[in-house]
Image (cartoon, helix red, strand yellow):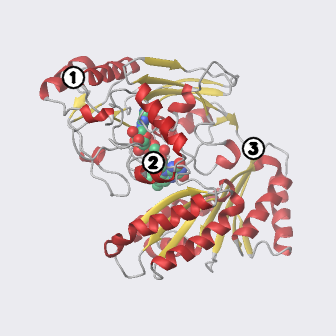
Amino acid sequence: MAPSADLVDPDAGFLAALEATLGPGAVSPPEQRYLEEPRGLYAGEAAALLRPRDTAAVAAAVRLCSEARVGIVPYGGGTGLVGGQLRTGRPRPVILSLERMKAVRRVDAADAAMTVEAGVILVEAQAAAERAGLLFPLSLASEGSARIGGVLATNAGGITVLRYGNARELCLGIEAVLADGSVFNGLSALRKDNTGYDLKGLLVGSEGTLGVITAASLRLFPRPAETATAWLAVPSIAAALELLGRLREALGDAVSAYELMHGTGLAFVAETMPEVAQPLAERPLWSVLIEAGTGAGFGLAGRLEAGLEAAWGDGLIDDALVAQNAAQRAAFWRVRESMSEANRRIGAISSHDISVPPSRVAAFVEQGRAALEAVDPGLRINCFGHLGDGNLHYNVFPPAGRNRAEYMALLPRIRAGVYDNCVGLGGSISAEHGIGRMRRDDLARYLDPAKLAAIRAIKTALDPRGILNPGALLPD
Ligand SMILES: Cc1cc2nc3c(=O)[nH]c(=O)nc-3n(C[C@H](O)[C@H](O)[C@H](O)COP(=O)(O)OP(=O)(O)OC[C@H]3O[C@@H](n4cnc5c(N)ncnc54)[C@H](O)[C@@H]3O)c2cc1C
């Protein structure tokens, strides 16, 4: 039996004790928005919302919950896409929101690092780096709401992984409250630290199940002096990959984003968000949005245009638009960033976030189409994502004019079709969104058994009472 089976619903006396410890206003009934998530698939339950102001208060709250066996759901910006930030069902947990811990504690140009608290919103972290003339490169469409604690807890990826790595690779150190209320003071800015197991690396991506992240030390980079952005129509995924290889050769590691989009996604944006202008008059089957950045004097724009011209000559691209100014660049990105909202408005039966080796993306798409046609030939697929990382957001929709509710009975076969195909090609069933509650059963089915056993053992060792995010990642 999982340790979280012994959890209890907090009573009024316990909540009063929490308030006495955390101070007035730090414990309140949860507003509805804390019980919802972006896809509208889960409805959360919680006995209270805790909003502590500092690490000591987080530690005190966790200690009290541990003693009373009350579950805790750590909460950032609520943008997670796998239902990790809310608990459905009983016993009810408390939600522990880090939103009041918003200090930028330090930005250090010499160490190329900054220390920020978990409640800092991602765009605020980017802005703090920019004020110091540096770059914090992590970038996601949800960056206006997602908080540092959340992006680390989910090991978020986004559009710049190709060049700068995901959240784990951008994190040098962590401060976190563990399940017994002890504080792990791991806020170093060291690039090298081989003192035993990598606890920081383990907490990053643990989705609130091993500790509450309260602050982090993050890597910073020089800001590119020259940037270039282009929108391309490409004849195939294979051509897009070959082009990426050539451009990386020609531009060094300057390519920071390489986003692939299927024509179905562009059609969804056109249908549901006609106010979003699309770069090309004709809607190609595959499009790529590329961005690169370099130091001054590189002549990036000229080199990129030369590379694209050569690629056009060799049949690797059908059409290209290079952004001539910041407004055009923003317009290109707006199309890409509208994709999730357009999908939501159309209403997916099933959403997936898979990765395969980049060389196998084309095979994944081809085989995936065949597998889903066998389920129902009318299903529509919108896939888009970070081609350079082999990461596709692969979403399956009902035929045009039909409602997803009519097709939900097909969900198990659709999931099996997508994940069997992905795992058969050496891929992962969760590239960047995590497991949460949505992919818990799929994890048990597809993960390497030795890894799953290690995950269970680590959870039991670090959270023996099962209070931290019960039901996320592993079943209750
Ligand atoms: C429009 C849109 C686009 C997105 N694009 C991307 C993308 O390109 N790449 C990508 O990787 N993701 C993407 N995401 C999902 C992504 O996981 C989240 O945006 C983000 O990483 C979660 O941060 P959050 O602060 O909102 O966390 P929440 O949603 O609040 O929480 C997510 C998980 O982290 C845990 N958690 C939160 N804070 C803490 C903490 N301080 N300590 C411990 N655990 C904590 C929660 O318990 C939960 O399990 C997107 C989401 C949306 C809505």
Q: Is residue 21 left or right of residue 176?
A: left
- Residue 188 vertical position relative to residue 457 in the rendered view, above or below: above
Q: Amino acid at mark 2?
A: Ile
Where does residue 316 sit, x and y in percent of width and height?
A: 79, 72
Answer with the quarter of the image where residue 31 lies.
top left
In the image, 255 versus 18, the foreground residue is 18
Of the residues under marks 2 and 1, which one precedes in the sequence? 1
- Tag count: 3
User: Which secondary structure, mark 1?
Assistant: helix
Other-residue count near label 2 (Cα within 10 Å), few / some / many at <14 / 14–19 / ≥20: many
Residue 29 screen position, x and y as percent: 20, 37
Q: Circle 3 — which element?
A: loop
| Residue 46 disc label | none
* Residue behind mark 2: 435
Residue at 85% over, 54% down: 249
Asked whether, in this view, residue 96 is left or right of residue 138, the answer is: left
Kindly identify the amino acid type of the residue bearing the numbered disc 3. Answer: Ala
On the picture, is 193 further left or further right than 433?
A: right
Q: Quadrant of residue 280?
A: bottom right
> CA–CA distance between discs 2 and 1?
32 Å
- Mark earlier in primary sequence (2, 3): 3
Please state, as top left, top right, bottom left or bottom right, where the N terminus lies in the image.
top left
10 Å neighbourhood of mark 1: few (<14), some, or many (≥20)?
Answer: some
Alpha-carbon distance for marks 3 and 1?
50 Å
The residue that label 3 is drawn on is 225
Cβ atoms under marks 2 and 1 closer than 8 Å = no
Q: Which residue is the site of mark 1? A: 19
Residue at 70 percent across and 39 percent down: it is: 223
Marks 2/3: CA distance?
A: 38 Å
